């Protein structure tokens, strides 16, 4: 399956998300800040990045990382980024998938926290181009 990088300062959420994604067959690495995540990407390019927006060092660190990744290297230009955030609960700004933009929010998808881990897994599969799982229920 795919190598996924979760960039999330909430260790409990990151661990839970990683467990779900590993059970789907993915290899998952977690970084808790954007500086370490950028170094990790240089060491091994992920197939997909799951990126939080707000970090202790900056309320917009995730946006900044997404822009830097897209701007600074061709190596990562095609790596899908799934942005996760609780920014709308902290600040009444109304961010959504409608704000995805090549310059301002250069990500492929956006999920608002709290995130249903089943939906997260489905979105990851879709971004990776994996075939949809058929239900085995009658």
Image (cartoon, rainbow, N blue to C red):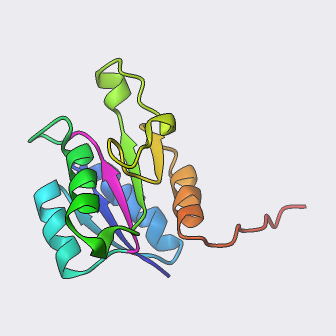
Q: Quadrant of the C terminus?
A: bottom right
| Residue at the image position 46 percent from the left and 66 percent from the top | 21
Q: Nearer the viewer, residue 117 or 3?
A: 3
Percent coordinates x, y for residue 126 in the rendering:
59, 62
The answer to whether residue 25 of the structure is visible from this angle is yes
What main secondary structure does the magenta stretch of the protein show? strand
Q: Quadrant of residue 85?
A: top left
Q: Position of residue 103 (x, y in %)?
A: 33, 46
For residue 66, above or below residue 20: above
Residue at 18 percent across and 72 percent down: it is 40
From the viewer's side, name the closer residue of 49 and 70: 70
**Mark count:** 0
Residue 51 is covered by the magenta coloring? yes
Residue 84 % position (x, y)? 38, 45
Region rendered in magenta: 47-54
Tell me if 122 is positioned left or right of 94 in this view: right
Q: Write down the quadrant of residue 4 in the picture.
A: bottom left
Q: Is residue 74 above or below residue 113?
A: below
Q: Which residue is drawn at the image coordinates 79% and 64% (left, top)?
A: 135
């Amino acid at each position: 399956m795919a190598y996924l990088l979760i960039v999330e300062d909430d260790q409990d959420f990151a661990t839970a998300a990683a467990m779900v994604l590993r059970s789907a067959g993915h290899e998952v690495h977690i970084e808790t800040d954007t500086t370490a995540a950028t170094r990790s990407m240089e060491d091994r390019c992920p197939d997909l990045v799951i990126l939080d927006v707000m970090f202790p060092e900056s309320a917009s660190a995730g946006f900044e990382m997404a822009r830097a990744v897209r701007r600074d290297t061709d190596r990562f230009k095609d790596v899908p980024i799934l942005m996760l955030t609780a920014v709308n609960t902290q600040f009444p700004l109304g961010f959504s998938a409608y704000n995805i933009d090549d310059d301002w929010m250069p990500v492929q998808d956006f999920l608002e926290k709290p995130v249903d881990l089943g939906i997260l897994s489905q979105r990851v599969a879709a971004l990776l181009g994996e075939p949809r799982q058929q239900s085995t229920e009658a």
